[in-house]
Image (cartoon, rainbow, N blue to C red):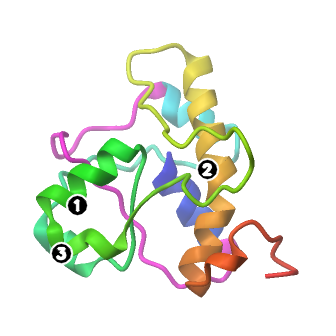
Amino acid sequence: MAEGLFREMAKKAGLDATVSSAGLSTGDGMEPSDYSVEVMADMGIDISRQRSIALTTEQVNQATHIFGMTEGHAELVRIYFPEALEKTFVLREFITKDGFESDVSDPIGMQRDEYERTRNLITEAMQSVINFVSSGDPTRFDKPDEEA
């Protein structure tokens, strides 16, 4: 879901970015779950052709930014790939609102409403991620586009 949303928002923002996602404990070639496809289609984003891939050293070396869905994911990336230390973040770490949830748990095997919740948590974080990736300036995280 995050890959599809980031790709769409980056395109709309005019950000020239190569977007991909990879997992630490996934098999290659798995399709997104039906609920993932459905809840993203509700936003007009088609992720049906995305396929899972396992994170590799080559991907880590090519990436300018790596975002984990949870603090645990980001920490594992840092442990397995120490060279990624300075470019690995948690997707929601840039949200500055009080009481926000920092982790986005995987809803695999749950009902559709959990996929909607996950999509919404990702969506809430995405503008701050776009601002960070496009500017590298942490002071721009939560500002609307016209102020950024």
- Find residue 42 and report its horizontal and vertical position in percent: 69, 37
Q: Secondary structure at mark 1?
A: helix
Q: Is residue 96 magenta?
A: no
Tell me which residue sits at (50%, 54%) in the image: 91
Which mark is first along the chain, 2 or 1? 2
Identify the main secondary structure in magenta.
loop
Residue closest to the eye, 145 or 137:
137
Q: Secondary structure at mark 2?
A: loop
- Circle 2 or circle 3, nearest the eye: 3
Tell me which residue sits at (36%, 80%) in the image: 64
Query: Looking at the image, is 138 positioned above or below residue 103?
Result: below
- Marks 2 and 3, how far apart in space? 33 Å
Q: How many marks?
A: 3
Which mark is first along the chain, 3 or 2? 2
- Find residue 60 and report its horizontal and vertical position in percent: 22, 71
Q: Image check: 76 left or right of 114?
A: left
Q: What is the number of the mark on residue 45?
A: 2
- Find residue 14 and report its horizontal and vertical position in percent: 66, 83
Residues rendered magenta in the picture = 11-34
Image quadrant in which the C terminus is located: bottom right
Q: Residue furthest front?
A: 98
- Give the residue type that dot 2 points to: Ile
Q: Secondary structure at mark 3?
A: helix
Give the labeled residue for mark 1. 78
Q: Image check: 2 left or right of 64?
A: right
- Circle 1 or circle 2, nearest the eye: 1
Residue closest to the eye, 24 or 48:
24
Q: Is residue 18 magenta?
A: yes
- Give the residue type that dot 1 points to: Arg
Give the labeled residue for mark 3. 83
- Give the residue type that dot 3 points to: Glu
- Marks 1 and 3, how far apart in space? 8 Å
